[in-house]
Amino acid sequence: MSKYLKYSVGGKPVTRLEAIAYYTKQAENYAEPEKSAFLEMISQEFQNDRKMEKSRSVWETWVQGGVGIILLLFSVYMAFLVPNPTRYQSGVLWVLVAMAAALSIVLVTGSIEITNKWGIKAAGGCAIFVMMFFYVPKIYDKTSHEQSKINLYVAISTTSKMQKISADFNPSSTEKMTVVVRKCFDQYTGQPGDDSSYISYRKSDGKIYSTEICSQEQEHYILMISAALAGTFPGKRQAYLHYKPIADSL
Amino acid sequence: MELSRLEKYKNQFKELEPKISYLQSYLENASREVHGIALITPYEVSSQSGMDEMSALFVLSLAAKEHLVSKRYAVFAEDDNTLIGEFPNKSEIPERINNPETGKDIDSEHYYVEISFEVAK
């Protein structure tokens, strides 16, 4: 925390603010150009008088900066490890990146001070954190928006064409994927269905959903094949392999 | 000591002309002193001349700008007003300073700074 010096003014020690007030009051008694010259001198002498801010040692700077860089690298690693994060995961990752940037800013010379639209003021590392936390890039917003949709590819019968349905989806939900997929489909058809009447596959690899939770799922492309239709194939896997290329072409 | 360097300020700041003249004679006397005056403070100049402390600080700063005096920050212990240090700029003033009179370390909460001016030798 920064402290300000005390000054001897009028023969006694006073705080910096009292010293400024004392000199300013006397300056007010003068006409121009003396008055402006006095006020400028007061400003130069006292305004940038923040002192005693404990300066970081080289060791502290590098440790803090090092932790920031490690966090930054970890964030990059996570970004590749989880290419389609849920909204919650994205939030956590974003906070992590903001913290990494705030920590590693010590390695960059210069200073920063910001005030956001709500009047929150911050300087230095805090400013970087606030800036990153509140000013989310548009590309990030867009990604988040895309993740709030689920895409269903539904094969009902051999006589009807496969349908593609895009529905709103809460990626941070703790509901089972099968239940949510079912609800989305029911909403689309307007008829409540039976959980056992459809098999839900993950479109990318054919994994069949059973107890998986929405918030754990990173891919939101689902292949739904009616149980009756799947029964015409030797196995569930064959049904998936048959309909996957059709879904890909939609 | 080239006190004439202050003449230009008399034209620039008409209201301060008598004060600048006073400072010129004050500095002339000070430089003649055999042992010299170690430090001149705005409060001291103000007390002796009757000018306000603001203008005393200002004319001394003009003298410093012309290298007739050099600005110093004299640090005093608040308890016993002992001079515990002199620094050419504020950033060099440490958080804790030892008081040679008492042997105790004094932190910034318990000392104060007097803006002073040393007559250039």
Image (cartoon, coloured by chain):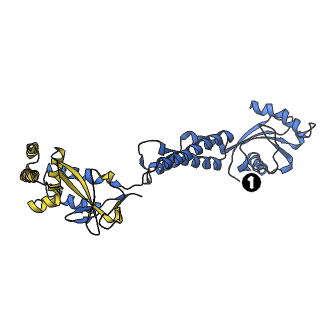
Chain colours: A blue, B yellow
Residue at x 50% of width, y 50% of height: A60
The N terminus of chain A - image quarter: bottom left
Q: Nearer the viewer, residue A145 or B76?
A: B76
Q: Amino acid at mark 1?
A: Glu
The image position of residue A186, as x and y in percent, is 77, 48
Q: Which residue is tagged 1?
A: A175
| Residue nearest the observer in this picture, A121 or A176 | A121
Q: Is residue A58 visible?
A: yes
Question: Which quadrant, please, contains the C terminus of chain A?
Answer: top right
| SS state under label 1 | loop
Viewer-nearest residue: A180 or A132: A132
Quick check: B101 left or right of B46? Answer: right
Instruction: Report x, y in % for residue B84.
Output: 28, 61
Q: Is residue B67 left or right of residue A3?
A: left
Residue A194 visible, this angle: no
Which subunit holds the residue at mark 1? A
Which image quarter: residue A204?
A: top right
- Residue at the far bottom in the pictured view: B79
Question: Is A234 left or right of A5, judged from the image as shown?
Answer: right
Q: Quadrant of residue A25?
A: bottom left
Q: Assess disc 1: are there few (<14), some (14-19) or many (≥20) residues with their C-alpha within 10 Å of its C-alpha.
A: some
Q: Position of residue A121 (x, y in %)?
A: 42, 53
Q: Is residue A62 above or below residue B79?
A: above
User: Residue at left 68%, top 40%?
Assistant: A81
